Amino acid sequence: MNKILIMMLEFFKTGLFAVGGGLATIPFLTEMSARYGWFTQEMLATMIAVSESTPGPVGINMATYVGYTSFGVLGGILATLSLVTPSVIVVCIIANMLEKFKNSRLVKEIFAGLRPAVVGLIISAVAGIFISTLFHTDAVGIAAFFNWKCIILYAIMLVFYHYFKKLHPIWIILICAAAGILLL
């Protein structure tokens, strides 16, 4: 099958099953990376950083980024459309039946069961990003295992954020971007 069609199918499946928002797409992207080799885990971490720091929904930004980096402009457009198509279909169907399902016990129970699954997927994704950012898992020796520059930057940002909680997230993103340029 054509690689672009495979990518479209993968993003369609991601859009259909990544319940909970953009961060819930990360496990699907991790699987795509392992299965097709379109991008590395390091590239995925970069995609997440870019997607989080650019305007718009994270999942859509990531789909666009993956499609573009893997297959150019057409890939970016098709990945984005493939990701959002299931949501559009589902929203249209649900909108037509909203009154009927609004107070349904079954629907409430389904969503009560989905919430922990979504939290688990997001925590798994965050743990993977955390580990790939702060540690060199393929390194030999304990000193080489730690990504010291990133660990120090992470610690500084934790302390900084603790004392400046009212600082807008845009400023935190800009400060971290500047620190990454200057220090890493």
Image: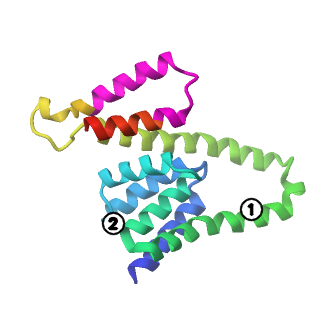
- For mark 2, give the secondary structure: loop
Q: Earlier in the sequence, mark 2 or mark 1?
A: 2
Compared across the picture, whether 22 is left or right of 47 comes to right
Identified by mark 1, the residue type is: Val
The tag on residue 38 is 2
- For the N terminus, the quadrant is bottom left
* Residue in the image at 22% along x and 34% along y: 147
Q: Based on the picture, tell me whether residue 164 belongs to the magenta stretch.
A: yes
Residue 161 in percent (x, y) is at 47, 22
Res 91 label = 1
Secondary structure under the numbered disc 1 in the rendered image: helix
The outermost residue toward the bottom is 1
Question: Where does the magenta region start and end?
Answer: 150-172
Q: Quadrant of residue 182?
A: top left
Categorize mark 2 by other alpha carbons within 10 Å: few (<14), some (14-19), many (20+): some
Pick the residue in front: 113 or 146: 146
Q: Position of residue 174 (x, y in %)?
A: 45, 38
Cβ atoms under marks 2 and 1 closer than 8 Å: no
Name the colour scheme.
rainbow
Residue at horizontal 28 percent and vertical 26 percent from the top: 152
